[in-house]
Each structure stands twice: as structure tokens, then as C-alpha cells.
Image (cartoon, rainbow, N blue to C red):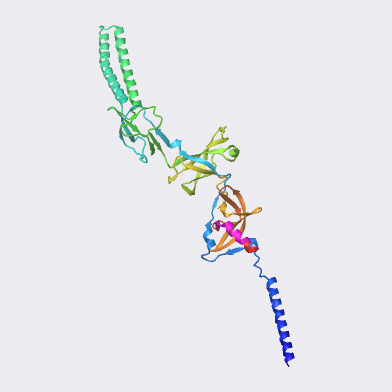
Amino acid sequence: MIRISNWLVAVTGLALLAAAIVLAHGRMTVTPRPPQLAPERSVLRYEPGSGQLSAIRVQAVQLFPVPLAEPLNGRVTFNENVTARVTSPISGRVVSLAAQVGDAVKAGDTLAVLDSPDLAAAVADLRKARADEARKQPALERARSLYEAGVFARKDLEAAEADDRQARAETERAAMRLRNLAPNGGEDGQYALRAPIAGVVADRQLNPGMEVRPDLPNPLFIITSPARLWVVIDLPERDLSKVGPGQPVAVQVDAWPDDRFPARIDKIGEVVDPATRRVQVRCSLVNPERKLKPEMYARVTLLSDENRTAVRLPNTALVTEGLYSYVFVEQSPGAFRRRRVQLAVQDRDYSYVQSGVEPGERIVVAGSVLLNSELGATAQ
């Protein structure tokens, strides 16, 4: 009995040892395989509050006109067709100011009043000429009466007539000079500087008591319509064949980065700058909200046609693998699907998608590289 028990114990121990060896071998050779996900149908999901979501920014995409080329540097300027630069035709000293920068004025409104010695001299000349004319007229009448009575000789009558014509000519000359200096009057020697057109006072280079002259380098006032502006761009010579009068363009400025202001090409220069190899192009712009200001720097995008549109994405939304481009579309909060897209035009800031994305879809515009790397790690 003792031998049989020992034998059973030995057999049981060998069986347990063999089972342990088989179990250990199975653990070393059998590993769980991750789920195999096709790249085009892969969906990444994150739980609410995941750290990865803080690095991801999603934005709904919209349709925009397709550009012809990369944005060009431009400058907003006054529309000279609705701008007047007011100067003084006479020398004088500023007595009072009636307009400030930003004031709306009508044609003929007084901007400033000048005390002018030149105007006072012109007024005195006119008064003197009128007095001389008033004195010569009765003399001519007396000469005619005496000539008809046979007292005056013919030459005396002719001399009186010549004096009268000379006096009337001098009066006319003095009146024209005064009218030239002060079209709206100025008999008191004070000159009213008036607005030639209606608009808004955009600039003033005048202060009370200041002495002004006709030859000052800068205008005293600039009056313009801020609702109508020009945008001037320097077009590279290679892009000259892509533009024409009336072609639409889109204008963007740093002050309003999310706004695109529509404009149209008005004039194309006739000469290429030999130093820069560029042609100056002028665009007309309507500015009803007065967001744009003269001398702003702008980025101008040439548009092929307002009717040709495509979904616009920032370049940060794209992930490139080989010859293909991909974006991540948000299906639900925390769930992102990778999708292949086809681009129509791409510049340094934006890409215009020909197919693969619909307007209104929410696209990952920041964090695409993170999602793509996690997708690749999941697929391995």
C-alpha cells in the first residue's frame, strides 16, 4: 500500500508539472491582436474630458469663391473720384475753424475763415475801380453834350470815351480777381475756405492762428466719401494674363481677419515696373460700414468667377500621405472619421476642396496630425 501511494503521488506531480509547462508556453506564444481598421473607414473615439480633445479644434466649413492665385499684397487708398484736397488760393491767417476731422460736410460749407491782406487789397482795388468808373461816366456824358453843341472837338469826345472804356475794363478786372479769390464774397477782407464737394473731412492740416500760403506742400483739408475706396495692388508680370477690368477680387485686412470684402478690378496699368517686374492694378471697393480705412495694408485674392465656389479649409486641417490628402470629420462629439479629399486650389494659408467635404460639415482644423498618428498606432 505504501508503494502504491508513492507511485500515485509521483504520477500526480508529473502531471501537474506538465500542465504548468503547457500553460506557460501558451502565455508566451499567444497574444491578443488589436482590431484591424481600414484607414478610410477608421473612426477615433474619445471619452468626454480626454486630454486629446484639448488639442483638437473643430470648425464648420463654408463655400468660398475659388481664387486664381495666391493672395497679393495691396494697399487701401482714397477713391480720387470722390476726394477733394482743399488748399487756399491766397495767403492769410486762420481766424476760425468750422470743420473738424470726421465731420460730414456739404458742398459749399465753410471749413475755415482766413484774414487775408491779399483779399483786402483785391476788395480795395475793386472799390477804387468802381469809383473811377463812376467818375468817368458823367465826364463822358458831358463830353457828348458839348460835342453835339459844337463846343468840344471830335478828339476830345474820343478821349472821354477811351477813359470810360478803360475805367469799365479796370472795374471788370478787379471784380474778376476778387471773384477768383473769393467766389462767394469777401468784401470785408475775410476769406471763407469752403468745401468743393460733399463728404467727410478725412484730414486737416490747419490750426487757429496759422499762416497759410498757396504754395504749401500739403492740402489744408481732405474731403472724401469713406464708403467708396480704392485698393491698389502690384500684380506680378506672370499673372497679367489672368486679370481684366471688371474681374472680382476679395480683400482681407488684419483688422478684420474673418471678413472678405468684395471688390472689382477697375484699371490695369500700362507699364511694367522694371525693378519689380510688376504692374499696378486698381480695384474699386464699396465700404458701406466704413470698416476699411485708407492706408491699410490688405491681402487681395484674384477670383476666377463668383459662381465657381468650393469648400475652403485652412491648411492645418490637411494631412498628406503620399499623393493623397485627408481630413478628419467630426461625426459626433469626440468621434472623428478620416476622409480623403481632392483639392482644387491651394495657397499658403487655405486649400479649396473640390470633392470629399460638404458645406456645413465640422472639420478638425487643429490637431489633425495628432489624430492621424493615433490612427496609425491603432491600425498597427
Image check: 4 left or right of 137? right
Residue 367 is one of the magenta-drawn residues: yes
Specify the quadrant of the image occupied by residue 2. bottom right
Residue 380 is one of the magenta-drawn residues: no
Instruction: Say which of 180 and 190 sits in front.
Output: 190
Instruction: Say which of 91 and 319 sits in front.
Output: 319
Q: Can the viewer see residue 311 in this picture? A: no
Q: Is residue 137 above or below residue 210?
A: above
Image check: 309 left or right of 31? left
Instruction: Say which of 3 and 347 sits in front.
Output: 3
Query: Which quadrant of the figure contains the N terminus?
Result: bottom right
Q: Is residue 314 above or below residue 165?
A: below
Q: Residue at x 27, y 9 (%)?
A: 147
Q: Residue at x 54, y 64 (%)?
A: 334
Specify the quadrant of the image occupied by residue 56. bottom right
Q: Can the viewer see residue 28 in this picture? A: yes
Q: Considering the whole magenta stretch, tell me its main secondary structure.
A: helix
Q: Is residue 147 above or below residue 224?
A: above
- Residue 252: x and y in percent read 50, 46
Query: Which quadrant of the figure contains the C terminus?
Result: bottom right
Q: Residue at x 45, y 38 (%)?
A: 79
**Image: magenta residue range:** 363-376
- Residue 44: x and y in percent read 59, 63
Specify the quadrant of the image occupied by residue 301. top right
Image check: 141 left or right of 77? left
- Residue 5: x and y in percent read 72, 90
